[in-house]
Image (tube, rainbow, N blue to C red):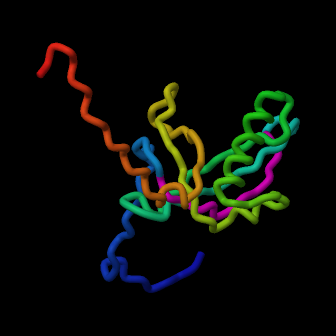
Amino acid sequence: MATIDFDTTAYDAPVRSSFDPLPPGDYAIIITSSEAKDTKAGTGQYIELTLQVTEGEYAGRRIWERLNIHNQSKVAEDIARAQLNGIAQACGVEPLRETEQLHDIPLILCLDLDRRDPTRNKIMGYKSAGAASKAKPAAKAVAAPAKRAWER
């Protein structure tokens, strides 16, 4: 046991972050860490990514993504590899040799609520951070409709 003389009244308590799901929408993020881990069953491997929101009201919030890159289910592998490809493209990293290549590159995370469990978020995809800042194309001018035969 350590004996310390610490006056807790001299400091404000830190603000706790909520673990509620984020509202559906697009969020500016970076990948702060990545790690390859074995599945609980020991029959596969996944990459766990830690994502951090970098802007707006939810700046600092973290989200975790797990990508089943080696799995008994070919479908699970295909989904994970497609997601990893989307992340790499959004980051502008080609070819991807190490997951650390994805760290600290701004990108956009598209989030929704999980339909089966609305207390959790579901990652819908990733976009390049440059895609969010590109100006939307100007609306085309709509010509006035031609007068009909009975109109003067």
**Residue located at (54% from left, 38% from top):** 122
Foreground residue, 13 or 146?
146
Instruction: Using the rendered view, name the quadrant where residue 102 is placed.
Output: bottom right
Looking at the rendering, in which quadrant would you find the N terminus?
Answer: bottom right
Query: Residue 21, position in %: x, y?
Result: 44, 44
Chief secondary structure of the magenta span? strand
- Left or right of 35 in this view: 22: left
Looking at the rendering, in which quadrant would you find the C terminus?
Answer: top left
Residue interval drawn in magenta: 27-39
- Whether residue 32 appears in magenta in the rendering, the answer is yes
**Residue located at (82% from left, 28% from top):** 73
Query: Residue 23, position in %: x, y?
Result: 40, 44
Instruction: Using the rendered view, name the quadrant where residue 42 is placed.
Output: top right
**Residue located at (54% from left, 54% from top):** 108
Is 14 situated above or below 146? below
Foreground residue, 136 or 77?
136
- Whether residue 69 appears in magenta in the rendering, the answer is no
Query: Residue 45, position in %: x, y?
Result: 83, 43
Query: Residue 77, position in %: x, y?
Result: 80, 35
Taking the view exactly as shown, the residue that stands out farthest to the bottom is 5
Is 116 situated above or below 140? above
Taking the view exactly as shown, the residue that stands out farthest to the left is 152
Foreground residue, 61 or 80?
80
- Left or right of 35 in this view: 111: left
**Residue located at (36% from left, 77% from top):** 8
